[in-house]
Amino acid sequence: MLSRRVRLLSIVGVIGLSWGLWLAVSPNSAADKSKKTDSASKKSKADAQDKKDAAADKPESAAEDDTAPKKVVKTDAEWRKILNPLQFRVTRKKGTEIAGTGKYAHTKTDGIYRCICCGQPLFDSKTKFESGTGWPSFFQALNDKAVNYIEDNSAGEVRTEVECSRCDAHLGHVFSDGPQPTGLRYCMNSAALNLVSRKSLEKDPKAKDAKSKSPGEDKENKAKSASEKNDESPQKSTTGKSEK
């Protein structure tokens, strides 16, 4: 009988101890859970603020991107309409004109050399020099965004190809054997260039700030206009006379 009472008291004591421990631990658990919730809330607010700040910075970045030349993309068929066979082979198929045959190899006309394909300004005649190679050579591009540089291994040696940054036209190659102040020699193909004299730019100041157009673009527009006129012109009837 005594042992039963002792056993009963022991069980009651264990239950009471467990209950006390549970009461002691539960508030802490609730507090920890509350802390975690507050932490998650603060993190969420911080992330939202970061996204807001990033969104505020986007217009400025977009404005910087707008200064980069907008790409001109055409099919080979479209390029053939505005370029002659040599221009097409050089600029679109990475060809090279025969040395000494280009019209700008020895010219000293003052002006700006533009891309024959898209009209983007590429070189200033003030940076042109006589290299003795038979190709028009420059020691500096007009600006950093005018051209792109591509590694070229096609001739069994490593060379640096120069492309128009606006339409990816092949212009030539650049070498490190040029005159000072740059020490560079931009060896270009005349077929890839179009020289606009400085006098013509001075006579028409708007031309300096106007959007560049390729020399063949007017030709293409005229062809389109002629085609549209033909579509609108009176069509012949089955009798062979024009219908008014």
Image (spheres, rainbow, N blue to C red):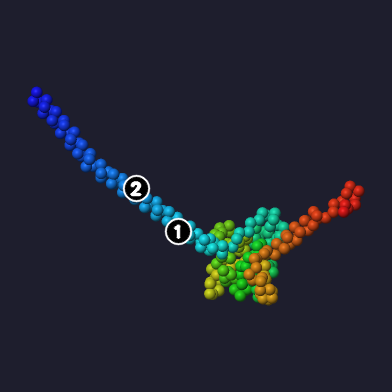
Discs 1/2, front: 2
When asked about the image quadrant of residue 228, the answer is bottom right
**Image side of residue 75 versus residue 230, left or right:** left
Q: Is residue 106 visible?
A: no
Q: Nearer the viewer, residue 133 or 175?
A: 175
When asked about the image quadrant of residue 232, the answer is bottom right
Taking the spot 18% from the left edge, 33% from the top edge, the residue there is: 15
Give the labeled residue for mark 1.
53
Q: Earlier in the sequence, mark 1 or mark 2?
A: 2
Q: Nearer the viewer, residue 2 or 88?
A: 2
Residue 85, percent across and down? Answer: 71, 59
Q: Nearer the viewer, residue 79 or 131?
A: 79
* Three-letter code for the amino acid on which mark 2 is drawn: Thr
Kindly state the secondary structure of the residue where label 2 is placed.
helix
Mark pair 1, 2: CA separation:
24 Å
Give the labeled residue for mark 2.
37
Tell me: residue 240, above or below residue 16: below
Q: Which mark is residue 180?
A: none
Residue 168, percent across and down? Answer: 61, 59
Taking the spot 56% from the left edge, 69% from the top edge, the residue there is: 143
Q: Is residue 60 visible?
A: yes
Tell me: residue 150, above or below residue 177: above
Quarter occupied by the C terminus: bottom right
* Three-letter code for the amino acid on which mark 1 is drawn: Asp
